[in-house]
Image (spheres, helix red, strand yellow):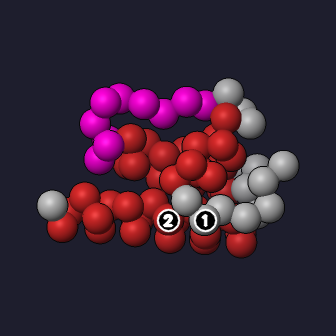
Amino acid sequence: MINEINSIADVRKWLMQFRLVVYTKDKSVDLDLMEEEVREAHETGLMEKKLFQQALLVIRREKGKLEER
């Protein structure tokens, strides 16, 4: 079980626990889909608040890096 999320790899590992693989060849779309899955997991009680906040922070940071390009 993942106790902390510090990178996109950690977000992917967390999602893999539920057999969710997000890969579309478009990193921006991948990040949007991951955010949607994380939000849904939190809303349904599968993801605790701390992990949810960490995951959103990581996803938003990655989105910011993409926008800088």
- The stretch of residues the image draws in magenta is 20-29
Helix, strand or loop for the magenta stretch, by majority: loop
For the C terminus, give its image quadrant. Answer: bottom left
Name the residue at 66% across, 43% down: 13
9 lies left or right of 44: left
Residue 11, percent from left and from top: 59, 51
**In the rendered image, which residue does mark 2 sit on?**
58
Residue 19: within the magenta? no
Residue 28: within the magenta? yes
Determine whether 33 is above or below 23 in the image: below
Name the residue at 50% across, 70% down: 57
Name the residue at 40% across, 68% down: 61
| Mark 2 and mark 1 residues within 8 Å of each other at the beta carbon | yes
22 lies left or right of 54: left
* Distance in Å between CA atoms under marks 2 and 1: 7 Å
Residue 64, percent from left and from top: 29, 67
Name the residue at 48% across, 33% down: 22
Give 6 or 34, whichever is nearer the viewer. 6
Is residue 6 among what the camera can see?
yes
**In the rendered image, which residue does mark 1 sit on?**
6
Dot 2 or dot 1, earlier in sequence: 1
